[in-house]
Image (cartoon, coloured by chain):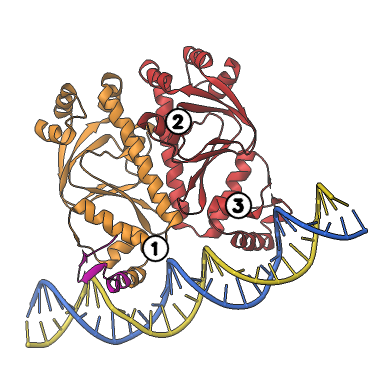
Chain colours: A orange, B red, C yellow, D blue
Amino acid sequence: MEEFIQEAYSGIFEKELVKEIAETAALIDFEEGDRLIEINDYIRSMPLLLNGAIKIMREDPDEGELLLYFLEKGDTCAMTLACCMGQTRSAIRAIAENKGSVVMIPVTKMEEWLGKYKSWRNYVFESYNKRLGEMLSAIDNLAFMHMDDRLLNYLKEKAKVNNTTVISSTHQEIAYALNTSRVVVSRLLKAFENDGKIKLNRNNIEIIAID
Amino acid sequence: MEEFIQEAYSGIFEKELVKEIAETAALIDFEEGDRLIEINDYIRSMPLLLNGAIKIMREDPDEGELLLYFLEKGDTCAMTLACCMGQTRSAIRAIAENKGSVVMIPVTKMEEWLGKYKSWRNYVFESYNKRLGEMLSAIDNLAFMHMDDRLLNYLKEKAKVNNTTVISSTHQEIAYALNTSRVVVSRLLKAFENDGKIKLNRNNIEIIAID
DNA sequence: CCCTTAATGTAACTTTTGTTACTGCCCAAA
DNA sequence: TTTGGGCAGTAACAAAAGTTACATTAAGGG
């Protein structure tokens, strides 16, 4: 396990910390679509993402959900962190965007390391900062952009985290991520196709030229 | 100065920490409307709010702005914190909602205290968590609610931080906070008045019964 | 090869929000 | 007392997004 951690977090953590992580943390593999955290779950450990991508969703108590952001290699979920430290239940849902693996660190350890390793403290703060940044950009999207641009953004992000120009999603799935309806997504996608930005196929979307 | 800090942060910080704060920090008074932080400002110190309220705004590079949340006594601005730690410029604007005062803590001290005082570390983490929570609820508002409910929420929040049932704002000011237009705000407010929720006067709004 | 089902295309309509334009009103300065 | 500027009320229209309904298409199982 140590070499996986080395690979994802080399240059971030000092050697002893990597060793400690390898000793105490549990390695967990996941497949696309796995529900890693559910809203209202108790969080007892903090996940460090080794590879793959995870999507973080927020849910409307009434109806509907929204993609907040993606996590990638080297990321942790600050929302989870917040739950650990604050002793509250999860405010978000985490779903595997594709195949990958995480190491889970027990809360006790992660608090201990805050005092012990400066690199750990920096990492935790950087994670918080990164997440605040992602939240801000989610807010920008919602507050200042129309659905067409939000959709384009989504396609770009999705292509990036999956490292491909072909997005395998149905229009309905996209509609969930943006908290809108399938018909609206289809309508906008068709317009993009007419503009030569994308090519629509069944169950996938090829990106031709966006931006 | 020590007694002010005691009052706002008693039970949070240990005595020595309060003393250190009193020694190193600068006390700054502000008036309603003062611009405390501007977007792109360099941040060299971290503000602890002793009394009064501060509104935190996000701006669209093109046009428009949005109220993210209010800070109150005992709060600090996690976005500012993020800037300090991450050495970046401010992503937000901070404007005094009413008269009050802050103590400003130099970055160097706040980092030093992270290792030295557990209560400080806890406070910093709690601030981050609180702010993540506020961001989430801003996202909920934008993603899941219509303008009428967003407006009602705004009125409630505003009444709370100013500790009054009479809100002294013009419709235009409210429109800025919600990133919409004055006409829309006037229209909705009039509807609320017809429902007996509020009473409209010139330059102020009396809250009668919302929720 | 047919049939079922999920996915997509599209029209028609409604609701919500934004925009423009004009009115009247209050208040304070001249 | 007049007047001018900021504020609020409202109508009429436009644009964006959501909804309903139905047609068409592709893929996979039998």
Label 1 to label 2, Cα distance in Å? 34 Å
- Observer able to see residue A97: no
x, y percent for residue B114? 38, 21
The residue stretch that appears in magenta: A189-211
What residue is drawn where x is 65% and y is 39%?
Answer: B163
Q: Position of residue B104 (x, y in %)?
A: 51, 24
Q: Compared to D24, does D18 lie above or below?
A: above
The image quadrant that residue A42 belongs to is top left
Residue to which mark 2 is pinned: B43
- Badge 3 sits on which subunit? B
Of C21 and B146, nearer the camera is C21
Please report contact status of discs 1 and 2: CB closer than 8 Å, yes or no: no
Q: Position of residue D3 (x, y in %)?
A: 82, 59
Q: Determine which residue is flagged by label 1.
A: A147
Sequence-first disc among 3 and 2: 2
Residue type at the position of mark 1: Met
| Quadrant housing the C terminus of chain A | bottom left
Pick the quarter of the image with the N terminus of chain A: top left
Q: Chain of mark 1?
A: A
Dot 1: element: helix
Depicted B36 relative to depicted C25: above or below: above
Between disc 1 and disc 2, the foreground one is 2
Left or right relative to B26: residue A34: left
Instruction: Report the residue marked by disc 3.
Output: B174
Check chain identity for marks 1 and 2: say if they share one.
Answer: no
Three-letter code, disc 2: Ile
Question: Residue at 23% across / 71% down in the picture?
Answer: A200
At label 3, the amino acid type is Ile
Task: For label 3, count other residues whose C-alpha is less than 10 Å away and answer few (under 14), some (14-19) or many (20+).
Answer: many
Q: CA distance from mark 3 to mark 1?
A: 24 Å
Task: Tell me how far mark 3 sits from mark 2, CA to CA.
Answer: 28 Å
